Amino acid sequence: MTAADGGGTTTLVVRVENKAGVLARVAGLFARRGFNIESLAVAPTDDERFSRLTIVVGVDAAPMEQVVKQLDKLVNVVDIQELNPSASVERELMMVTVRAEPEIRGQILDLVRIFQATVLNVGYDEIMVSLTGSPSRVDDFEGLLRPYGIVDVQRTGKVALPKLVKAAPDPLAP
Amino acid sequence: MNMNGGQALMKALENEGVDILFGLPGGAILPVYDPLIDSSIRHVLVRHEQGAGHMAEGYAHATGRPGVAMVTSGPAATNIVTPLCDAYMDSIPMVVVTGQVPYAAIGTDAFQECDTTGITMSVTKHNYLVTEAADIPQVIHDAFYIATTGRPGPVLVDIPKDIVDPNNPRSAMEWYTPDSHDLPGYFPNQAGDAELIRQAAKLICEAERPVLYTGGGILKSRGAEALLELAEMTGIHVVTTLMNRGGFPDDHPLCLGMPGMHGNYTAVTAMQEADLLIALGARFDDRVTGKVGEFAPLAKIIHVDIDSAELGKVRRPDVAIQGDCRVVIEELVKALKEMGGSEAQPDRNQWRSRISGWQERFPLTYEQSKGDELLKPQYVLEQLRDSTPSDTIVASGVGQHQMWTSQYWKFNHPYTWVNSGGLGTMGFAIPAAIGAKAGRPDRMVWAVDGDGCFQMTAQELVTAATEGFPIKVALINNAYLGMVRQWQEMFYEERYSEVYLTRDVPDYKMWAEALGCVGLRVESPEEVGPAIAQANEINDQPVVVEFRCEAEENVFPMVPAGMSNSDVVVDPSQRDQPR
């Protein structure tokens, strides 16, 4: 299994100071230490002083402990969470334009319905749809659309948050 | 108080305790050189910006205080990249201020513009591009804090011209004295985990063949005294890596000296045979470990380092303690005392006698020159060592002369060895010696240089002569890029490729004189002592003593690159000795 098909990857959620050049420091560190980024999503947090990077790293390519420790040494990196896929909720957004001559458009709309995807734009022989879901669900959707002829596809890379605690605290506990 | 950014920069540097600044002015940094005239800080005008960087490093090596350099933008900034990388590899506290084109011109390929923060990102601990004059006091305060705390390292501050130029309204600001740091991602930790320290103490009490493997972290943490106490209480032998020469006295009976590729046989072999390595501020560098998979195969590892990324980077430790070396050693000594101190250490007589057996059979050795032969570099270094005060600071370049200096010198005081370990920067010696002399004017400072190295940075002898730094240079002239020649002899079937530098060109004596130094030339063993004595007497001028040395001398012992430390190649005269 390779990192690209979803196995052998780890997701790092890295909170950084929202300052010029910070993304270059992180990307430069990965390049310099020979680590490989599978995907990267960046956005500001609710606190404007910080941004959050969601980085998917191939674990076969690098000892994860070294990745985390070297990242942590960057002065602008505030904290790092290593997210295990089974203990986190992951989402990715895909926008895709697919060939859809009028006679087969219905088949594609079937898939859109099944996956609860969204039609964004329609052309005379193409259709643009989007899907938000777990990375593997997005993979499935993309795979099913491929035979129709994908014209353009854009994926955001995944973002993730840790799963929440399920068991409520025992009200009788001291 | 109203002032401009340039005045604020000088005031901020003064507030950090900077007493000396190594630099060279140019267009973008020009406005800062005006308030410099009114500052208490002494400026040393270098002849090349690389010199400024290495001087700042030499100053930091010798004093423990951060070295500071200031140069202009573009080519000056690229010229100082080598010292930044050198300081980064060897964890030297240094702050470099570079000029930059006006903020509005950044990105336009303006004259003498380069992306200084981009270029230096991977060779600095941190760097800044300051965009507002009002940020200067805080950034300088943060830069010194980052450079000197945790694992020390170089910090670069890039300052656009407009925010320091009094003729530009963007330079106007109100002075404030920063009293804190807003660095939400930077928490240098000092203390080690108490439970892990107890575990380490327990391993030490159980070890039959322990070795203290000590690196540059000892000197960086001012931990030499603590190390001495630990070694003497436990009776454990100490190896001092290239970065910790002087961190434990060479004359101490427990000192085994330098390990590694050109370490002495006993230091290399004791580590190889150990059942416990106590690594203190050392990073398992490839020049120390040889082939990593076969390094110290029987040893458990205790690894202490302020940088948690070093713990487990090369070799998985059994006990990993993140913390300042001195603080952790002091806690370790306490924990060992609670367990019974020296009484609790097992009988290690058998191990001691193995070590002394290696020391007897495999001392450092060379054959003295005969008849018309030129000087042996080892002889020169022995003479230099024996004719200078024991607290002499010695700086070296990189190559054979560096290894011989580390091997033959007796370092008995911390902060007397100034060298380029990690990056291996040829030409380091002369500017670093000048920086060391600037920091310790009370000490005698010798640079030991090779002829290849000398030709890279000799121009800084002009700086030494004109700025009043009477350093002394022992130039080991063997007419070759000697270390490369040795590798070609040993590993490329004596096919010598581009390593001969010529013996007589340049004329080093004349060159030294032209640079404002006293130039001496020595060709026979009888002249060595008197020439050194003469050089030692000269205190108003730098001195260069050219020692004409045998070209074919090789550095032994040697662990060939990629080989196991068990396959250390000893001096030809010792190859019949039982291991």
Image (cartoon, rainbow, N blue to C red):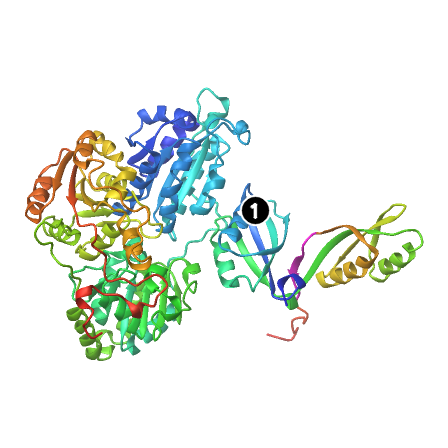
Viewer-closest of B4 and A156: A156
* Chain bearing mark 1: A
Farthest residue in the right direction? A103
- According to the image, label 1 marks what residue? A23
Viewer-closest of B182 and A66: A66
Amino acid type at mark 1: Leu
Viewer-closest of B568 and A173: B568
- Left of B366 or right of it: where is B560? right
| Quadrant in the picture for residue B181 | top left
Residue for point 66% across, 65% down: A164
Quarter of the image containing the N terminus of chain B?
Answer: top left
Question: For the image shown, how many numbered marks are present on the structure?
Answer: 1
| Quadrant in the picture for residue B127 | top left
Residue B185 location, x and y as percent? 49, 51
Magenta highlight range: A156-164
In the figure, A120 relative to A2: above or below? above
Q: Is residue A159 within the magenta segment? A: yes
In the figure, A10 relative to B318: above or below? above
